[in-house]
Image (tube, grey):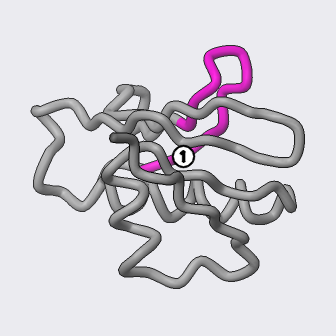
Amino acid sequence: MTDITVTRNDEASRYEIRTGDTLAGFAEYDRRPGEIRFTHTEVDPAFQGQGLAGRLAADALADAAASGDTIVPYCPYIAKYLRTHDVPGAVVRFPEPRG
């Protein structure tokens, strides 16, 4: 079985999930004073259906919660994940709908 790892890439402002040495997906973020805004999550089609998006979201959000910053989910996938899963220690502020 291939090792699955999630790492934070501060230079690219994203969390990356890899299977072995292959980049399988990422969750982009934008840091602001006191908050981290998740803006986009993507998993390569070749790796979809393997639960990688959920693993990526869980690990990225756990790391973000540990930072003490407020999590602001602009990404629909991250917002849905936060509505359906408990992330210990997470402080979440859902953005106001635009309209």
72 sits left or right of 56 in the view: right
Residue 19 visible in the current orientation: no
Query: Which quadrant does the C terminus fall into?
Result: top left
Q: Residue at x 38, y 27 (%)?
A: 23
Where residue 97 appears, as percent x and y from the top left, is 40, 50
Image quadrant where residue 20 sits:
top left
Give, as a single range, the part of the protein colored magenta.
4-15
**Is 17 rendered above or below residue 53?**
above
Residue 64 visible in the current orientation: yes
Q: Residue at x 44, y 40 (%)?
A: 17
**Is 13 rendered above or below residue 59?**
above
> Which residue corresponds to mark 1?
6
In the image as oriented, which residue stretches furthest toward the front? 99
Q: Residue at x 30, y 35 (%)?
A: 42
Q: Residue at x 53, y 61 (%)?
A: 94
Q: Residues within 10 Å of mark 1 (few under 14, many from 20)?
A: many
Q: Secondary structure at mark 1?
A: strand
In the image as oriented, which residue stretches furthest toward the top? 11
Q: Nearer the viewer, residue 68 or 63?
A: 68
Check if residue 73 falls in the magenta segment.
Answer: no
Three-letter residue code for mark 1: Val
Check if residue 9 falls in the magenta segment.
Answer: yes
Q: Main secondary structure of the magenta part?
A: strand
Q: Nearer the viewer, residue 8 or 68?
A: 68
Where residue 44 appears, as percent x and y from the top left, is 21, 30
Q: Nearer the viewer, residue 36 or 63?
A: 36
63 sits left or right of 7 in the view: right
Query: Which quadrant does the N terminus fall into?
Result: bottom left
Where residue 82 appears, as percent x and y from the top left, is 46, 70
